Image: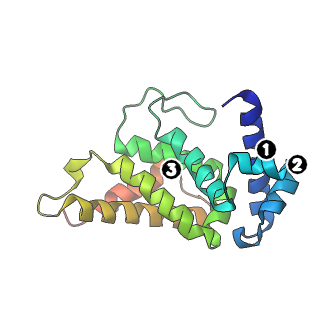
Amino acid sequence: MDRRQRKTRKAIFDAFSRLLEKKHYSHISVQNIIDEADVGRTTFYAHFQTKEDLLNQMCEDIFGHVFSQVREKEHTHDFSSKPETLKNELTHLLYHLKERQKDIFRLLSGESGDIFLKYFKEQLAKAFDGMNEWFPGSVPKAYAEAVYVTAFAEMVSMWVKQGTIETPETLVNYYYDLMRLGS
């Protein structure tokens, strides 16, 4: 993707984010996004097939960085030299969700919430993949993973809706404490 395409894509993402601050997802049309981004219809459709595709790619943009193999120091946090543990991955993810809490809150509060949570859980499942030590031997991995992923996703949803008051580290520690209840 060249610089011009990245700039256009960013303008569309930013416009969508601004619209989410003013309106619920269901009340935002592609035309609203086009007008807010000041791009043509053809330009929008060159980047996204539908409004849902834009939402999916926005989620991918959020999660793609966190779960990428390349770690760089960022202005609000630095995970570049930390080991790639599940705890660090989840904490890193929460920093990004906290930075974009207005967008995430809007995504969670409308019917887009189901789409966002579905995508979020898919990304979390990737983070949990390979964490076999978490899964009790008598429980098939798929069931255990569903419980761990769903519990974390619901905690994050509540955290965002309550204004991300706790630090990312605190929330991840709460999660670890809860998941160890029964052991």
State the quadrant of the N terminus.
Answer: top right
Which residue carries the number 2 mark?
Answer: 38
Q: Residue furthest left?
A: 138
Q: Quick one: label 2, few (<14), some, or many (20+) residues within 10 Å?
A: some
Image mark for residue 61: none
Between circles 1 and 3, the one closer to the viewer is 1
Query: Mark 3 packing: few (<14 Cα in 10 Å), some, or many (20+)?
Result: many
Q: CA distance from mark 3 to mark 2?
A: 36 Å
Q: Amino acid at mark 2?
A: Asp
- For marks 1 and 3, give the CA distance: 28 Å
The residue singled out by tag 3 in the image is 168
In the image, what residue occupies the spot 79% across and 56% down? 18
C-beta proximity under 8 Å, tags 1 and 3: no
Quarter holding the C terminus is: bottom left
Front residue of this view, candidates 11 and 17: 11
Query: Please, is residue 64 above or below residue 173 in the view?
Result: above
- Residue placed most toward the observer, 125 or 153: 125
Give amino acid for label 3: Pro
- Specify whether 29 is left or right of 125: right
Kindly identify the amino acid type of the residue bearing the numbered disc 1: Ala
Which residue sits at x=16%, y=64%?
Answer: 139
Kindly check if marks 1 and 2 are in contact, taking CB atoms under 8 A apart as contact: yes
Q: Is residue 74 left or right of residue 144?
A: right
Mark 1 / mark 3, whichever is N-terminal: 1
- Which badge, 1 or 2, is on the more N-terminal residue? 1
Picture layout, residue 24 above or below residue 136: below
C-alpha gap between disc 1 and disc 2: 8 Å
Q: How many marks?
A: 3
Relative to 164, is 37 above or below?
above
According to the image, label 1 marks what residue? 11
Q: Position of residue 157 (x, y in %)?
A: 53, 65
Q: Quarter-wise, where is residue 130 in the image?
A: top left
